[in-house]
Image: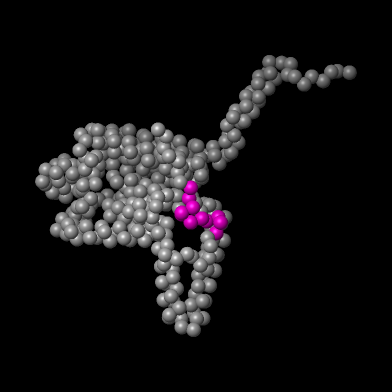
Amino acid sequence: MAATIDEPTGPAQAARAAASASSDVATERYPFLRDRRRLLAILLTSLAGTMIVVFVVARGELAGADARAYWGGVRVWLAGGDPMLPPQPYLPYVYAPWTVPLFLPWALLPWDVAWIVWRGINVLLLVWSASWAYQRHPLATAILLCILAGPIAATLDTGNLTLLCALGVWAAQFTGPRLGGGLWALATVLKWFPAPLWLILPPRARLWGLIWMAVAGILALATWPLTLVQIETAVSFPRPFRLDYLLLLWAAVPWVWARPRLLEPSEWRPLATEIGAWARAQWTGIRTAERPVRAAGDWLVRQLRVLLGLEAPASPASASAPRPETVASPPAPAG
């Protein structure tokens, strides 16, 4: 009877066995190789990063027009001029006049150094926030980065404030209510697009956001003549389509990532059903009340107090959809 040979006896069999063993070792060391979703996330993230880098490198010395406007506006203001009507080659400063001093420490640097610092801060904060998001939902983060590759590249190219404003609202999910409301208010004063994001702030931060916006209104009145010039300049200044405003989506990442059901298409219909049932229950309660008009007024006041964090909601939040306050704080950057 022939003996059974388990070990490979020929060179080809030995090579196949070695390749199989090597593959098993690699899989054990890098378990994500078994996860197709993770591999797709890696591929999409690499694609998004490549597109951004290629665009930014291709622009070269033509980049930084918006950042130079902030830098030059401060310099013109320090020289006694009007930052909203600057000399060439600066673009006009089209933000609230009282925000000019906010750029003062940075604008004291020589332009070549200031531009490197400005772009470097934007890149570091973007990478940090993307790392935080990727660790929690890799594929969703990769898809969003691909969608936003164009706006991110445009922002890094011009040096516009858009990305920093979006990241300010992002950070508001993890700070205290005063600072969180202040970050949202400052972003909204500088750029109008963060205004709708007030709804996703933690409740007490919404209240402080309104308080800080009132302070901003007082500062605008204190500089009213310059504010009128700023409004006129901003309205009349020719602008192309602002692709970078799509970064509004990036600002909402912590809020959405804390609610996994929003990331699962299979959950969208049940969520819509739950929202519809809640709305019908509220309407039925108001309509069947002894005094419907008074009941509607009481309901509006109660919802406003809940929105501002002055009153706890009537029903606890779903365990799968925690409030923003329950989001884990991001790890501190290395170094």
Left or right of 43 in this view: 56:
left
Instruction: Pick whichever, 119 or 264, lies toward us.
Output: 119
Residue 295 % position (x, y):
45, 78
Q: Is residue 42 above or below residue 82?
A: above
Image quadrant assignment for residue 113: top left
- Magenta residues, dominant SS class: loop
Instruction: Pick whichever, 33 or 172, lies toward us.
Output: 172
Left or right of 265 in this view: 9:
right
Image quadrant assignment for residue 68: top left
Q: Is residue 18 above or below residue 118?
A: above
Q: Is residue 335 visible?
A: yes
Q: The N terminus is located in which quarter? A: top right
Residue depicted at 29% across the width and 59% down the height = 213
Residue 318 % position (x, y):
55, 59
Q: Is residue 269 visible?
A: no
| Residue 327 colored in magenta in the image | yes
Q: The C terminus is located in which quarter? A: top left
Single out the residue that lies furthest toward the bottom: 290
| Residue 166 colored in magenta in the image | no
Residue depicted at 31% across the width and 55% down the height = 185
Bounds of the magenta segment:
318-328
Single out the residue that lies furthest toward the right: 1
Residue depicted at 42% across the width and 65% down the height = 310
Residue depicted at 54% across the width and 37% down the height = 39
Instruction: Pick whichever, 69 or 63, lies toward us.
Output: 69
Left or right of 81 in this view: 196:
right
| Colouring rule applied to residues | one colour
**Number of numbered discs overlaid on the protein picture:** 0
Residue 96 % position (x, y):
22, 53
